[in-house]
Every structure is written in C-alpha cells, then in structure tokens.
Image (cartoon, rainbow, N blue to C red):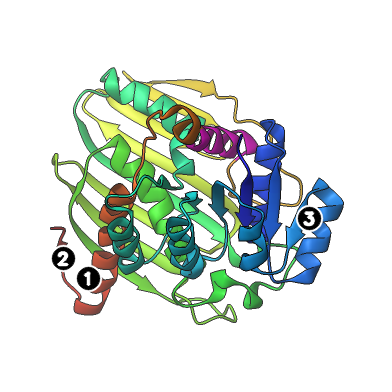
Amino acid sequence: MLKIIVIGLGSMGKRRIRNLLKLGYDDIIGFDPRDDRRKETRKKYKIDSVSTIEEGLECRPNVMIISTPPDLHYTYAKIAIKNNIHFFTEVNLSSKDVKKIIQKLKNKSVIGIPSCTTLYNPVFKELNKMIKKKSLGKIFTMYHHFGHFLPNWHPWEDYRKFYASKKETGAAREVVPFELIWIIALFSKIKSVYGQNSKISKLKTNIDDIYEILIEFRNGIHGILVIDVLSSPSFSETKIIGEKGVILCDHNTGIMKLGNNGKWKTRQLQMGRMEKGYKGNTATELQYEEEIQNFLNVVIKKKKYPYTFNDELEILKVLDAVELSNKQRKKIQIK
C-alpha cells in the first residue's frame, strides 16, 4: 500500500493531489506551513494536512511528492532519502542541487525521479512519431517560442510575491528546462549554445523576462528557443524544417500542420481537460496524471521512467551555459 505525502500545497501541490485522487490513490497527507493552504486543501480534497515536516514523517509515508518552489526541492529530497521514502520532484533549476541528489541516491534503494511533464504532451508524442517515420526526411532546423504573461501565471495571487518573481527561480528561467526536456528528447543532445537573457519589460520584478537561445545539436540540426513572460495572450509554437517539408504545431491547442509538396495537411490532436482558474500556457490534467502514474509504476512495479536526475543534470548544464554565454557574449560548448 502506498501512503503519499505531498510537500507544498500551492498550485502544483494541489494539482498533484487532484491527479492522485483521479487515479484512485486516496491515502494522502499534505504538508505546508501556511494555514490558508492547509485549510483550502482540507475543504477541496477532504485530506488531512500538517504544518511541519516532522508531523508528516510521523504518518510514515513511503512516497513523497515534492511540489515546493524549486529552491526547496533539495531540502526535502534529502529528507526523503534519509528516511527511505521514494520521491518525485517538480522540475529543478539548480545543477548543484541535482548533483547532490544524484550523489545521495548512490547505493540506496530509494527511488528518486524528477518531473518531465512535457514528454506526455500529445504534440510531443505525435512529433516523435513523425520524426521517427522520417516524415520530413533530414531535419535542418527547428524554432520554438513559448510566450506567457507573468501576471497571468497564477492569476489568483500577486505575481510579485511568489517564487516565479525571484531571480533564481524566475518564470522565464524555469521554463527553459521544461522546454529543453522535450526538445532534446526529440532532436538530440546539445553541442553548443549562444544565449541572451535579460529584463526588457516594466514588470515589477528583478527577473530576466526573456531568454533567447541559438542551439547547435550534436547531430547537426540548428535551433532557436525563445522563452518570454511578456506575451498576452500566451502561446507555445514550434516550427520544424526538413528536406521534405515543414511542421507547424501549437502545443496548447493541439493543432498540427504538415507541409509537403506545396500543400498543407492539418490535424487536431485531443489535448485533454485544463483545470479551471489557469490562463494560457499550462499542460492539461491528463499529462500530469500520466506522469504521476508512471512515477508510481516505477515504485510499485519497478517499471522504467523516461527521465532521470542524470538527464536533468545534462539539461541544467545547458541552462548554466546559456547564462554563461550571456555574461561572456560568446558561444559556449556543452561538455
């Protein structure tokens, strides 16, 4: 039997609880030091919650889902490892913290897994099929632009007061690894980057609100990745150009267009339901449910998961290289 503790009862923590309940897992306890979040969770989901991690550990959970702001992930991963609790983290932003998690997991029976929600997006799955079938032949270049408006990120709270407005965990910075997860899985590992990140808006934060990245993949494909938190309405669009044609796709609506021989064919993918209250770019509940079920399948049935902390470390090396490139104003090779 699984007894699951969800760490952090903000937006993502509540989403993970919804996912678990939908999947039939109801032996859940929540932890958050904020009284308002605990009360809301009890009211909406009818689960118990505690105000300290010590109280949570007294409940003897064997699975931990860490849905705190990214700069706290390592704190709770360390606690999970020490107490032999299998754990899942949302996307991490610190290569140093991920290195420490990998080190602490060595020679342990504890299963630790990071989030990779974008690998469950129906658009990514379809792109993966098309590229494996060589629908475009040799691929020359790709372009992806994710645009969102920071004040709409969590429309129910002041954008200046939550973690996406902090320098280290800024919204645009956080999205870079989200997008690199599927981009690297689809094309190849990255050889070099030339990056530019800065604050160009009048948003009342000190974060870089745009990242622009020139990418050279190890297999010779060239790419451009742009992340901004300035766009309203939001969008998430990809263009892939190959010797046999062009693919255009919208990761939010699921509309895909394949251009061959001067003609376009359009497909509409089924994307699933989006939870009420969100605006713009966010994955549907189906993607999060599939991700959590796969994590629990690893715990219960020892099945494989498509993404590891070692994979995440490679992606964070790219993020670090982008920011180093911005400082040094030159291309950075990824070792």
Q: Which residue is mark 1?
A: 325
> Label 2, on which residue?
331
Q: Quadrant of the N terminus?
A: top right
Q: Does residue 295 show up magenta in the picture? A: yes
Give whichever of 99, 238 is nearer the camera.
Answer: 99
Specify which label sits upstream in the sequence, 2 or 3: 3
Q: Amino acid at mark 2?
A: Lys
- Does dot 2 land on a helix, a strand or a loop? loop
Q: Position of 125 compared to 138: left or right?
A: right
Give above or below for 193 relative to 309: below
Read off the magenta span. Answer: 284-296
Identify which residue is drawn at 31% across, 64% down: 100
Q: Secondary structure at mark 1?
A: helix
Q: Total label count?
A: 3
State the image quarter where residue 252 is shown: top right
User: Residue at label 3?
Assistant: 41
Looking at the picture, which amino acid does disc 1 mark?
Ser
Examine the rendering and report whether any part of residue 189 can be seen.
yes
Q: Position of residue 86 (x, y in %)?
A: 47, 47
**Residue sitting at 25 percent across and 22 percent down?**
244
